[in-house]
Amino acid sequence: METPVPEWRGDVSMPVPTAPNNWISKKMTAQELWDTLSLKLKAIIDEQSYSMWISQIKPVGITRDVLTLAVDNDFAQTWVRENYVPLMTQVLSATLPDERREIAVKVESSEAEPLPPPAAKPAQDQVQIKKRTAKALSKCIGTMNDNFTFDEFVVGPSNSWAHAAALAVAQKPGRAYNPLFIYGSTGIGKTHLMQAVGHRILERPGTTVAYISTETLLNEYVNSISNNSTLEFRNKYRGVDALLIDDIQFMASKEGLQEEFFHTFNALYTAKKQIIITSDRPASEIAGLQERLVSRFNCGMTTQVENPNFETRLAILRYKQSATPEPLSDEIQTFIAENVQSNVRNLEGAMQRAMAYRDFSNDGPLTVEKLRYLIRDLIKNDGEITLDSVKKAVCEFFNVPLTDLLGEDRKRSVAIPRQIAMYLSRRLTRASYPDIGASFEKTHGTVVHACQQIHRRLSVDKELHANINAVVVKLGQDPAALEMKD
């Protein structure tokens, strides 16, 4: 999902108050000029874009005709330069009609030129003490990762919209975007964003946040039936201020759990309590999920987290390395960012391997060639689809055990995923029909039949088409490219 291009609501050429020449250097400080400029930008840019990008900018100073601004990170620096500097320049030119020379607006990372903290804000240690005190007075059901906070989340084009939605929910839980449904492939930050909201809500004294995976929720539900304690199970999750549920796709076909969760959802939603859900696909594409649940999941905000692009991957590595005494070289970080493309978990895994080799190996300095061998499995998975990776993706998507996929079970819930896996194996790998048959423990003829069946149904079965596209995306491929293949 691309970060939305800012929408300008006004015409920057509108008449504005004029000022005498050289007013920047003689009349106004950087702060005064920025206050004036940002006020005009607020009338032009849509509220969401202004809050996300412009409100975060701080003025650094004025040198000759250059107004220098500071932002928090490299991504914000690039985004503001490309999307807002031209508008800022236009606004300044319109404000200074008698000034002939162009006025450039530079955006510099605040890490390079840090600004002094505002005097009105309490010291950082006092802020942390207040947060810890508030959390001590709050309650968390389940275990959340202490590092999964907004401060530790690196924003890029692939996740900026989801980040903005999560931030809005954290500021107004139960009122802004309820429920919040975040979907995307594994290991790209869905749980991080969800728990970041949870941590922020816990900073409000007296709040209760519950975080739980769908698998754990299922186990608790089954145990409550066995122990005749369903009332306790209901009360546990219906009395919270925010309910965070991970991997909702595993609720598919669990009719009893879906019935129970339907009533829990209604109770929380009616009480204006926040609900956040993550999934590997949109709610409408989860086969076996009740329509009434799909409808409720879609009534709030649905947002996607996509695989990070090169710039975001590099920014993530640099951020992680900034906390280490001896960061990896730029060459090594760039190589990892270029070659490990599947998800953030693999990216961080590659970084950890590189650091471990550098710190503990006696085989000389870490080079790109040594690193290429060291993370060869991660690079292979990103660059080449294998029969095993296809089977794994299909099993995860349809929630089918690998033993069933390779077995003789002919139930529709198993047979269709098996045929899809064979079809994708033929389309996405170089394997022949006999090779695929051997891998699936089936005959050559069975594979040919499966591929023909799926190919014929694709043009008339929209659900099948959507499911195959979702598996292709899960494998890191473009569904459009699949359709172009013979």
Image (cartoon, rainbow, N blue to C red):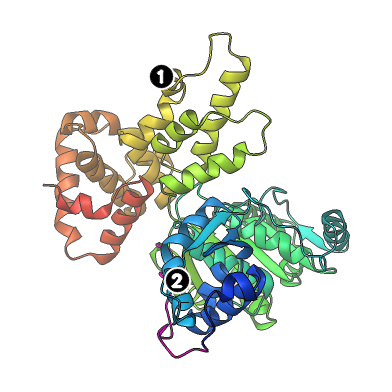
Q: Amino acid type of disc 1?
A: Glu
Q: Nearer the viewer, residue 320 or 460?
A: 320
Picture coordinates of residue 205, whole percent (x, y): 84, 68
Residue 266, relative to residue 343: is it above or below? below
Q: Quadrant of residue 286?
A: bottom left
* Residue at left offset 39%, top offset 64%: 285
Q: Nearer the viewer, residue 220 or 80?
A: 80
Q: Which residues are magenta?
A: 1-17
Residue identifier under label 2: 89
Q: Secondary structure at mark 1?
A: helix
* Residue at left offset 73%, top offset 54%: 142
Q: Is residue 132 left or right of residue 429?
A: right
Give the class, few, some or many, for how many residues have Cα within 10 Å of label 1's Cα (few <14, many ≥20): few
Q: Is residue 420 left or right of residue 341?
A: left
Give the class, few, some or many, for how many residues have Cα within 10 Å of label 2's Cα (few <14, many ≥20): some
Residue 362, relative to residue 32: is it above or below? above
- Magenta highlight on residue 474: no
Picture coordinates of residue 82, whole percent (x, y): 42, 61
Residue 85, relative to residue 125: is it above or below? below
Q: Which of the two discs, 2 and 1, sits closer to the camera?
A: 2
Labels 2 and 1: the sequence-earlier one: 2
Residue 396, relative to residue 340: is it above or below? below
Q: Secondary structure at mark 2?
A: helix
- Magenta highlight on residue 16: yes
Residue identifier under label 1: 369
Q: Is residue 453 left or right of residue 65?
A: left
Picture coordinates of residue 312, whole percent (x, y): 47, 48
Q: Quadrant of the N terminus?
A: bottom left
Picture coordinates of residue 280, whole percent (x, y): 46, 55
Q: Is residue 253 visible?
A: no
Q: Is residue 43 visible?
A: yes
